């Protein structure tokens, strides 16, 4: 589907100004993660000698693309606070809008797609397997939010378990949008950010929402978090009451306080207890850390374009080694797609815990697997981080009661339980409460990662390696 003529003309009209002002690299990062340009295309733009040449090449590229790419470009401009450039493009943004000003919601599949693109909801990963049970759970809880004046659905689970993919998939549903969130769905990637970055994100969101209103309602961007919260409260409650905010990858409950404005929110996080300090109805969905074998093998089969039955024996071992982690299976699948003869090699890398070499897919937030896992440990308070590292004493597939750790840590049972609960809440540890007493265990990947990082820091300490 090519760019609509109207959209094309709008881009050509603004071409000169865009070439003068934009920093293409910043915009392309967003567009890559939206999946509308490839890393190769980015490279072709990046090798141009000057910034202006790069900008011109990016616009040339856009002119050859489709409406969704244009929406992604527009969203990137807003995210990078090029409000003056975004404004004139908005008029010609393809398709529907949330309050009907640009034509009402015509409930076709394309409208849903365009609406989600406008809200910045990421596309499906290229290789995707369905997780129907989890998906239903999230959708059911989103349905429940409708009844409440405002509320939160927390999707939580360990690094790379597929929370963000699941959240995006949950809202790709025409019925849900029509019945529950006809005013729009807005995706905000949060991550670990400071107050000023958070302010910029909310400014962009307010800008996006205000573009949907009459031009008189356009105001200067809010200048403090308090002001931003009030502006957002007004917009969400008065102008877009039946919309959903998706806050992806929240680390800190102080971020949630800014959104504590009685609207409807879906959030993804590794930390289960974040919504304790905010008000409104609360629901949660736990994302299990691994896919079942069949689904995990399906990912490998899809990447390598093989029949699942024809996969080599290493495929099962790879799945077993990473306990079906969607992230790891996908990373390895993507590597095998390019180097189909390397099943054995990647299996060995995994067994030797060479996490650094297992590198990211373009839309994932971290460069490599070890970064994704290290992030959760880094945010622990110092004293707890040291205690967590002691968990290297655990063995694979062995679950232990808290009292063993009382001995190891030399702490009272109550203290130990509190600490373990903190690890569990942050998806750094798992608990099996099916038996009489709680039994704790690590995911294989976490254990491997801990052992590996301990070896690394010990060898640094002793000067070897
Ligand atoms: N249903 C799925 N089908 C195929 N691949 C998936 C699926 N879910 C996740 N993945 C793969 O796993 C990767 C990580 O998924 P995702 O970003 O959703 O994890 P996450 O739980 O949000 O991780 P983090 O805690 O780091 O934010 C994706 O980039 C994708 O490659
Ligand atoms: Mg995520």
Image (cartoon, rainbow, N blue to C red):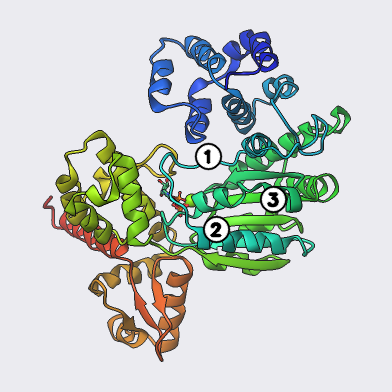
x then y, percent, for residue 163: 49, 55
Q: CA distance from mark 2 to mark 3?
A: 14 Å
Q: Residue 259: image x %, image y %?
A: 69, 54
Separation of disc 1 and disc 3 at Cα? Answer: 18 Å
Residue carrying label 1? 123
Q: Give the vertical position of 421 relative to 78 (above or below).
A: below
Q: Would residue 463 be visible to someone looking at this image? A: yes
The image shows residue 458, relative to residue 72, as above or below, that is below
The x, y position of residue 159, in whole percent, is: 41, 56
Residue occupying image coordinates x 75% and y 38%: 209
Q: In 3D space, how far apart are the residues under numbered discs 1 and 2 (Cα atoms)?
A: 16 Å
Residue drawn 45% across and 87% down? Answer: 414
In front of the other: label 1 or label 3? 3
Residue that label 3 marks: 175
Left or right relative to 437: residue 27: right
Question: Image quarter for residue 221?
Answer: top right
Q: Quadrant of residue 262?
A: bottom right
Q: In the image as oriented, which residue stretches furthest toward the bottom?
A: 436
For marks 2 and 3, the one nearer the N-term is: 2
Whether residue 56 sits left or right of residue 424 in the image: it is: right
Q: Which of the marked residues, 1 or 3, is nearer the chain's N terminus?
A: 1
| Relative to 322, 139 lies left or right | right
User: Tag 2: Cα neighbours inside 10 Å, few (<14), some, or many (≥20)?
Assistant: some
Q: Position of residue 290 (x, y in %)?
A: 38, 61
Q: Who comes first in sequence, dot 1 or dot 2?
A: 1
> Which residue is identified by label 2?
135
């Amino acid at each position: 589907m090519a760019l609509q003529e109207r959209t094309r003309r709008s881009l050509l009209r603004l071409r000169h100004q865009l070439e003068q002002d934009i920093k293409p690299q910043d915009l392309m990062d967003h567009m890559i993660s939206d999946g509308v340009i490839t890393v190769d295309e980015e490279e072709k733009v990046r090798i141009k000698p000057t910034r202006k040449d790069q900008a011109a090449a990016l616009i040339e590229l856009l002119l050859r693309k489709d409406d969704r790419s244009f929406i992604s470009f527009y969203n990137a401009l807003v995210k990078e606070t090029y409000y003056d450039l975004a404004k004139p493009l908005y008029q010609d943004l393809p398709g529907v809008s949330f309050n009907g000003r640009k034509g009402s919601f015509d409930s076709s599949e394309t409208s849903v797609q365009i609406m989600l693109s406008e809200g910045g909801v990421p596309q499906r990963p290229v290789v995707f397997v369905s997780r129907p049970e989890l998906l239903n759970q999230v959708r059911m809880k989103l349905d429940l939010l409708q009844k409440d004046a405002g509320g939160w659905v927390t999707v939580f689970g360990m690094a790379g378990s597929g929370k963000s993919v699941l959240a995006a998939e949950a809202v790709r549903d025409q019925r849900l949008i029509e019945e529950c969130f006809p005013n729009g769905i807005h995706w905000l990637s949060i991550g670990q950010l400071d107050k000023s970055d958070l302010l910029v994100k909310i400014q962009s969101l307010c800008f996006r929402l205000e573009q949907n209103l009459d031009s008189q309602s356009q105001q200067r961007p809010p200048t403090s978090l308090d002001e931003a919260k009030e502006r957002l409260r007004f917009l969400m409650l008065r102008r877009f009451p039946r919309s959903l905010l998706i806050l992806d990858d929240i680390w800190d409950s102080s971020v949630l306080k800014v959104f504590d404005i009685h609207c409807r929110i879906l959030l993804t996080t590794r930390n289960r207890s974040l919504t304790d300090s905010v008000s409104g109805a609360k629901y949660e969905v736990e994302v299990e850390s691994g896919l079942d074998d069949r689904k995990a093998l399906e990912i490998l089969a899809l990447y390598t374009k093989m029949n699942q039955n024809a996969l080599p024996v290493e495929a099962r071992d790879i799945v077993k080694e990473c306990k079906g982690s969607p992230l790891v299976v996908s990373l390895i699948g993507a590597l095998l797609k390019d180097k189909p003869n390397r099943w054995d090699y990647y299996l060995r890398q995994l067994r030797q815990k060479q996490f650094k070499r297992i590198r990211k897919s373009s839309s994932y937030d971290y460069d490599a697997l070890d970064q994704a896992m290290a992030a959760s440990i880094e945010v622990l308070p110092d004293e707890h981080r040291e205690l967590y590292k002691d968990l290297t004493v655990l063995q694979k597939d062995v679950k232990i009661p808290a009292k063993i750790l009382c001995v190891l840590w030399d702490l009272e049972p109550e203290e130990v339980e509190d600490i373990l609960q903190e690890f569990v809440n942050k998806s750094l540890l798992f608990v099996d409460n099916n038996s009489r007493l709680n039994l704790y265990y690590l995911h294989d990947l976490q254990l491997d990662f801990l052992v590996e990082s301990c070896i690394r820091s010990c060898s640094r300490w002793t000067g070897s390696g």
